[in-house]
Amino acid sequence: MNIKCEKIKVYEMTCTSCESRIEKAIKKLNGIVNVKANYSTESIVVEYNATLCSISEIKSAIKKAGYDTEHSNNFGFFGIFILTAIIVLLGFNTNGFNMDSKLANASYIMLFTVGVFTSIHCVGMCGGIMLSQSITITNKKQGKFEAIIPTLLYNIGRVISYTMLGGIIGALGSVFSLSITTKSIMQILAGAFMIMMGFNMAGFSIFRWFNIKLPHVSCKVKNKSSSPFIVGLLNGLMPCGPLQTMQLFALGTGSALKGALAMFVFSLGTVPLMLTFGALSGLLSKRYTKKILKLSGVLIIVLGLIMGNRGFALAGININPLTALSNGSKTLLNGKTSDSSNSNVSKATIKNGVQVINMTADNNGYTPNAFYVQKGIPVKWIIDGKQLNSCNNSIVVQALNKQQKLKNGENIIEFTPGDKDINFSCWMGMIQGVIKVVDKLDTVDTSKSDSSLPPASTGPSCCATPVADSSSAVASSKPSIYGSDLTKVPTKKLIHKALVSEKYQNAKFKGTGYELEPLIVVTGNSSNTKLTFDLSAFDNAEGEYLILDLDTKNTISSFTAKKGINEVEFSPKKAGGYTIVKDNYVLGIIEVVDDLKTTDLEKTRSKYFSPF
């Protein structure tokens, strides 16, 4: 017997599950005595009978399984990074594009996109399990619809499993997030792990020593259960790199609800390809799926950077890479460092021996978000809670070990600055700012550029209802139909109740200039509401209008309007606030209540407008 032992390098492994896949492919050959794959070292050690099997046959089996035995270059990966950098450079130097806020807003969209790309990996790792469950049942006589039921059950079980795991892991994150420091450490670690796993998925070996192994429960259960739904549920325990990466993301959210939602969105992204796996399996080569998975790795790295940056912001450390890239890009394109807008920078004024700085919290974030104060003199920081939402309603100042919940109206934080600058952020770490500490306040010239300052909050905050950016500046240059002081406008002009008829509740908005009258319409949730928009005198009337849920920020409805009269049916499922948005500009609000007859319009006014 001619037994040989060879060590072969194997490339394109994306996680530890690839080990068993390669081993199974090689064991199918005649003459194989033993084979052991190692993800960390990108190699296999194989013992075989040279009279029955050859090294070329072994390498051929590896390639058929979708892996390579020769090192391929990573120029394509770097090309993706270069393309991303160009987009960011253009974004920072093009009006109306705020890359930082887009990334913050795109978190769930990106999670869904990651799910779509990693579903290629799901097909490779779990497609056989899904098909085995389908074949078990489809051997029986049945219609076409019944034939896809096993696949549907498997994917439903998988989505439920992922969502439940996300909720459990997110809840664990909330239990251990006992302080600002703990929150920041968790997010930084989660971000670091995601970056490492992203590099692994993208084909780089620098972090291959880092991998998480779980028992192959879901792989073994297929022979013990005839229920595709149960197998789908157990799929959450699959030792899968992309899945474990998303579980780290869920952990970093520090919330059972947000963790479950993150995993739910990710799992939904994996469903379409898994459902159509049978049709696509013959069209999509394994080598092509590896390239798609590399792109998914890039997205994982971006998610890791976002998560890590939030953690550093909570820790009071401003290392936002997008800010640095913005400053660097403007240096290259303009020949000088970026200059901060005057509205973004403020210098303290000294009154009776106390430094006073003023900041507004609204749907744009924090304005201004950069201040200069003098060392050793007490500071009175006045924050005007003008438009509070689920993101800007709590401010974190790590240097002061303080997290303060903001209320509508005036909020005050008092402290005496030492030698170091004071970074602050919202509780999610997405909206950031800094208080620069100087020796002499008189020497500060806010008109001069300072590349160390964060960019102004010129776009929507992470959780706010979209608001105007460049278009709002045009609008604000015209006189408002409500005057310059809303507190002096009668409630009956600002807020109208819907009129109830037999079939509908009827409410009307009239557009004048750039505004709607009234600003708020109150309607009940007992029946459908017919909304009439008279846009005869409205500027820029044509286009798409969105109706967004104020709580979830999800689009509930949309319609395309024209100059003149437009009628739209609105069927809210729950009580709450809904905003009417066009071109990222909030035009009005629909307040849905349980009992329209007993609604107090003054309470509605106090809910949406600052106290007066």
Image (tube, rainbow, N blue to C red):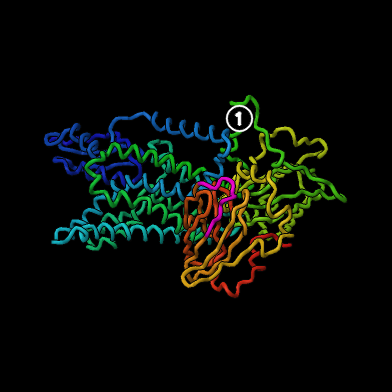
Q: Position of residue 379 (x, y in %)?
A: 79, 50
Front residue of 571 and 532: 532
Location of the N terminus (image quadrant): top left
Q: Which residues are magenta?
A: 532-542
Residue 437 seen in this snapshot: yes
Residue at 43% from the left image edge and 33% from the top image edge: 80
Q: Which residue is mark 1?
A: 330
Q: Looking at the rendering, which quadrant does residue 204 occupy?
A: top left
Q: Position of residue 128 (x, y in %)?
A: 24, 50
Q: Main secondary structure of the magenta part?
A: strand
Answer left or right for 120 relative to 516.
Answer: left
Front residue of 23 and 265: 265
Location of the C terminus (image quadrant): bottom right
Residue farthest to the bottom? Answer: 598
Q: Name the kind of residue labelled 1 in the image.
A: Lys
Q: Position of residue 234 (x, y in %)?
A: 32, 59
Front residue of 142 and 70: 142
In this rendering, the answer to whether 74 lies above or below 222 is above
Q: Looking at the rendering, which quadrant does residue 168 occupy?
A: bottom left
Residue 136 seen in this snapshot: no
Residue at 64% from the left image edge and 68% from the top image edge: 601
